[in-house]
């Protein structure tokens, strides 16, 4: 199932759940209309962000996912995609935190777990580069880190 269809189905289910809850609690239709509008806006920002990601426009994608989060800060899919855009922009530390937020909201989230692992690998490689940039002052630590990376990857 493609991501756009999956997102549409999830949001449709959420809207249906909201309608059911609103009807059961006697919530007025005017407050429902506002939520429906917000949900449509979230879907629009999210879908545009996914499209920007597919086109390699990570800065645009990041801004769109941030806008989607302004409307719905409890959506782990949005956090996951925002973290992906952040990682592609070299914002490793920010992406680590954002992936963690996605996993707080949905602990069993295979894609976010995979991408979090990839972000940690990039963070380790960044630290290795930093140690190497120290010249002689970082040689021993760079060698130790490189050994640990190789050991972790079976090389």
Image (cartoon, rainbow, N blue to C red):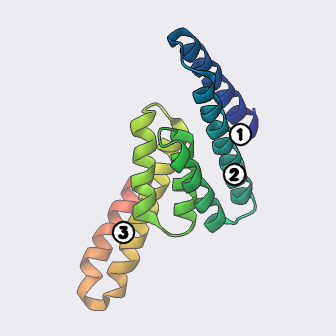
For label 2, the residue is 50
Q: Where is residue 44 in the image (x, y as percent from the top left)?
A: 71, 46
Tag 3: Cα neighbours inside 10 Å, few (<14), some, or many (≥20)? some
For label 3, the residue is 146
**Which residue is at a point 51% across and 39% down the rendered structure image?**
76
Which quadrant of the figure contains the C terminus? bottom left
- Front label number (1 vs 3): 1
Query: Disc 2 and disc 3: Cα gap in Å?
Result: 35 Å
Pointers 1 and 2 in contact (C-beta within 8 Å): yes
Tag 2: Cα neighbours inside 10 Å, few (<14), some, or many (≥20)? many
For the residue pair 22 and 83, the one nearer the viewer reads as 22
Tag 1: Cα neighbours inside 10 Å, few (<14), some, or many (≥20)? few
Left or right placement of residue 141 versus residue 116 in this view: left
Q: Position of residue 29 (x, y in %)?
A: 63, 23
For label 1, the residue is 3
User: In the picture shown, does residue 20 fall above or below 142?
Assistant: above
Q: Where is residue 57 in the image (x, y as percent from the top left)?
A: 69, 66
| Corner quadrant of residue 147 | bottom left
For the residue pair 152 and 12, the one nearer the viewer reads as 12
Q: Position of residue 42 (x, y in %)?
A: 63, 43
Which of the two labelled residues, at mark 2 and mark 3, occupies the earlier sequence position? 2
Which of the two labelled residues, at mark 1 and mark 3, occupies the earlier sequence position? 1
Q: What is the number of the mark on residue 152?
A: none
Q: Is mark 3 on a helix, strand or loop?
A: helix
**Which residue is at a point 59% across and 13% down the rendered structure image?**
20
């Amino acid at each position: 199932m493609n991501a756009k269809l999956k997102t549409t189905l999830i949001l449709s289910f959420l809207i249906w759940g909201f309608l059911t809850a609103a009807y059961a609690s006697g919530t007025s239709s005017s407050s429902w209309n506002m939520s429906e509008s917000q949900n449509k806006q979230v879907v629009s920002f999210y879908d545009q962000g996914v499209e920007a990601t597919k086109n390699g426009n990570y800065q645009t994608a990041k801004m769109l996912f941030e806008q989607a989060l302004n409307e719905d800060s409890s959506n782990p899919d949005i956090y996951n995609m925002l973290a992906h855009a952040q990682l592609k922009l070299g914002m490793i530390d920010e992406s680590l935190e954002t992936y963690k937020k996605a996993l707080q909201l949905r602990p069993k989230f295979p894609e976010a777990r995979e991408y979090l692992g990839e972000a940690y690998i990039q963070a380790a490689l960044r630290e290795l580069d930093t140690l190497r940039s120290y010249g002689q002052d970082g040689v021993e630590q760079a060698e130790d880190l490189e050994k640990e990376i190789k050991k972790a990857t079976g090389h």
